[in-house]
Amino acid sequence: MVETLVHLDLSKTALVTIDLQGGILVGNAFQPHSGNDVLAASNKISAVLKNTAALIALVNVNPSTIGYLRPFEGGQHERKTYPSDYSKLLMTIADDETSHNVIKVTKHNPGAFFGTDLDLQLRRRGIDTIILTGVVTGNGIYATALDAFQYGYKVIVVEDAITDRDQQLHEMFFTKLFPKIALVSLTDQILKEIETSL
């Protein structure tokens, strides 16, 4: 269910990307959109927001805490070795030193708000609207969207810039749950709205 966007005030808007990092995107099968497609859509949105009044918040997860996110599975406290580039953000803008409106946030939980300074970083800049992209729908995306909603942010979830490992789960979230807490949009709609807001 895709809805019509409201006008974006870029000075009060942040793009928040979730877990677009090497250890999660590379080598994993996602549905209904590929990891590459989600990354490409997120890169398009960040490119038009670069050095505007908007904020771009790139969120990754620390691999050393992943085991603790599954408390009912055996062996969650075992120390695992992860490749050095597991947490490396794959967003093009992550390594762009010419962009002055990008922050990076490392989370240790499914959602990007709990246990991080993301809320503080958004509020000190007067942000009230979040455009959300990344992986995966039923975990990091939903946890972040729900927290953002409960913190009083207006949330826009970009369906074709979000994906899961389970297509049915992805579709259920977008048809049943996200419409209760967020506006559902598509990349092209977001890009058009940003262009009219520049």
Image (cartoon, grey):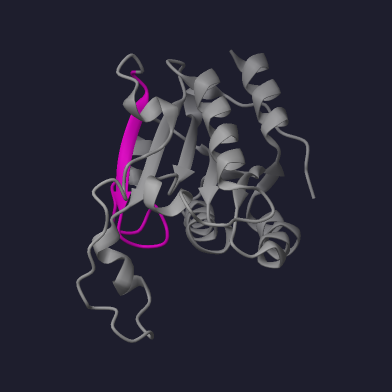
Depth check: give the residue in front, 6 or 34. Answer: 34
In this rendering, the answer to whether 137 lies above or below 17 is below
- Residue at image position (30%, 73%) is 68
Depth check: give the residue in front, 125 or 159. Answer: 159
Q: Quadrant of the C terminus?
A: top right
Horizontal relation, residue 182 to residue 61: left or right: right
- Residue at image position (36%, 27%) is 102
Q: How many marks?
A: 0
In this rendering, the answer to whether 18 lies above or below 92 is below
Main SS of residues in magenta? loop
Horizontal relation, residue 21 to residue 105: left or right: right
Percent position (x, y) of residue 178?
Answer: 66, 56
Percent position (x, y) of residue 135?
Answer: 52, 52
In the figure, residue 66 lies in which quadrant? bottom left
In the figure, residue 70 lies in which quadrant? bottom left
Horizontal relation, residue 111 to residue 64: left or right: right
- Residue at image position (67%, 15%) is 196
Percent position (x, y) of residue 22?
Answer: 39, 46
Horizontal relation, residue 81 to residue 194: left or right: left
In this rendering, the answer to whether 116 lies above or below 80 is above
Looking at the rendering, the stretch of residues picked out in magenta corresponds to 100-117
The residue sitting at the left extreme is 79
Depth check: give the residue in front, 168 or 156. Answer: 168
The residue sitting at the front extreme is 27
- Residue at image position (56%, 40%) is 36
Percent position (x, y) of residue 3?
Answer: 78, 42
Whether the magenta-drawn stretch holds residue 162 is answered as: no
